[in-house]
C-alpha cells in the first residue's frame, strides 16, 4: 500500500454529491471606512468641534474646590481649549426610534455620525462635554433677562446673537418694544449694547432693573453626552491582500446645550 500512487481521478458531480461548503476564495466583504468618510464629507453639514476638559481653576483636588463664579470657564466647570471644523450628519428617524426603544432618548437629543478624521487628516476624537456648533444655520431662542447697568451698557445672552427678532419689557401693564439701531445695537461678538438713554429702567435704591424678554436667532450648540460605540473598528484588505485594522465613523449621542447648561454670567 505504501508504494501506491495517490488517487488522481476526478469524479463528476451527480445529484447525490455533497456540494462544496467553502468557496475556493472568500470574497472581501470589508466595510470601506474611507468611502464612508467621503460620503460624510460630501453630504454632511459643517460643525465646529470644541474640545472640552474640566476647568483647572481649582484650589484643592481633594475637595474639588472650584469657584462657582469662575471667569476662566464662566462658572460652568468646563474649559474649551480648541476648535476645529468637521463634517457630519444627523441620524435617521429609524435610529431615533431605536434609541427610544432602549430607553435613553430624551427631548432635544440626537445622534450625529462623524468621520474618523478632520478634513486635514488629523484624527478626530470626541469626549463627554465636547461641543458641536452648527455655524451655517440658526435657530430661534428666547430668554428672560434683567437689565444690569454694565460697563458700556453691554449685556450678553446665552449664545452669541446672530440677529434679534423681538425685545420688549412692561411697566404698569404697558408694553415697551425696543428696536435695533434705535434702542440698542448688536456687537460683533453677539452681545446687546444698549444706546445710552434708551436702555430699560434701573432702580438704584432696590438695585433692580426692568425685566425684558429677548427673542433672537443664534447658531445651535450640541453637547456630546456619550459614544454609542466606544471604539468602532473593522478590517480592510490593503493592496497587497493583507488585512489591516481601520477605525470607522463614530456615532455620538448629543443634546441641545441649553437643555443642560446654565446661562453664562453677565459681563460686568
Image: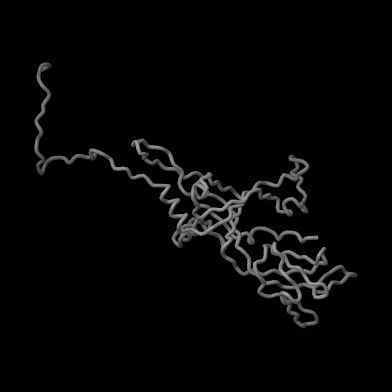
So how many labels did they put on this image? Answer: 0
Q: Position of residue 218 (x, y in %)?
A: 63, 65
Q: Which quadrant of the structure image shows residue 187? A: bottom right
Give the quarter of the figure containing the C terminus.
bottom right
Instruction: Give the x, y percent position of residue 186.
Output: 71, 68
Q: Residue at x 49, y 55 (%)?
A: 102
Give the x, y percent position of residue 228. Answer: 50, 50
Q: In this view, does 105 lie above or below 228?
A: below
Q: In which quarter of the image is the N terminus?
A: top left
Query: Looking at the image, which is closer to me, 68 or 138?
Result: 138
Colouring mode (rainbow / by chain / secondary structure / one colour): one colour
Front-lying residue, 4 or 177:
177
State the residue lying farthest toward the right. 205
Question: Is 236 situated above or below 209?
Answer: above
Residue depicted at 61% across the width and 54% down the height: 131
In the shown orientation, is residue 113 left or right of residue 62? left
The location of residue 147, given as percent across then percent down, is 79, 69
Taking the image as shown, residue 244 lies to the left or right of residue 77, namely: left
Q: In this view, does 205 lie to the left or right of 245?
A: right
Residue at x 72%, y 52% (from the top left corner): 73
131 or 100: nearer the eye? 131
- Residue that lies at the very extreme toward the top in this rendered image: 3
Amino acid at each position: 500500500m505504501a508504494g501506491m500512487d495517490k488517487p488522481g481521478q476526478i469524479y463528476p458531480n451527480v445529484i447525490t454529491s455533497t456540494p462544496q461548503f467553502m468557496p475556493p476564495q472568500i470574497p472581501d466583504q470589508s466595510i470601506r471606512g474611507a468611502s464612508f468618510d467621503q460620503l460624510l464629507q460630501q453630504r454632511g453639514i459643517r460643525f465646529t468641534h470644541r474640545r472640552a476638559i474640566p476647568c483647572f481653576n481649582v484650589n484643592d483636588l481633594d475637595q474639588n474646590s472650584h469657584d462657582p463664579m469662575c471667569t476662566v470657564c464662566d462658572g460652568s466647570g468646563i474649559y474649551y481649549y480648541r476648535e476645529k471644523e468637521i463634517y457630519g450628519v444627523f441620524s435617521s428617524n429609524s435610529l431615533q426610534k431605536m434609541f427610544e426603544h432602549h430607553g435613553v432618548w430624551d427631548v432635544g437629543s440626537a445622534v450625529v455620525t462623524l468621520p474618523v478624521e478632520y478634513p486635514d487628516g488629523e484624527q478626530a476624537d470626541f469626549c463627554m462635554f465636547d461641543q458641536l456648533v452648527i455655524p451655517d444655520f440658526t435657530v430661534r431662542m428666547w430668554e428672560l433677562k434683567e437689565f444690569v447697568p454694565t460697563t458700556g451698557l453691554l449685556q450678553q445672552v446665552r449664545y452669541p446673537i446672530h440677529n434679534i427678532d423681538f425685545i420688549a419689557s412692561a411697566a404698569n401693564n404697558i408694553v415697551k418694544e425696543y428696536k435695533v439701531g434705535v434702542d440698542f445695537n448688536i456687537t460683533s461678538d453677539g452681545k446687546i449694547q444698549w444706546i445710552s438713554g434708551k436702555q430699560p429702567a434701573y432702580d438704584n435704591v432696590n438695585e433692580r432693573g426692568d425685566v425684558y424678554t429677548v427673542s433672537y436667532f443664534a447658531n445651535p450648540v450640541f453637547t456630546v453626552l456619550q459614544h454609542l460605540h466606544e471604539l468602532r473598528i473593522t478590517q480592510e484588505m490593503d493592496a497587497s491582500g493583507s488585512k489591516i485594522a481601520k477605525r470607522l465613523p463614530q456615532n455620538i449621542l448629543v443634546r441641545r446645550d441649553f437643555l443642560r447648561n446654565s446661562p453664562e454670567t453677565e459681563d460686568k
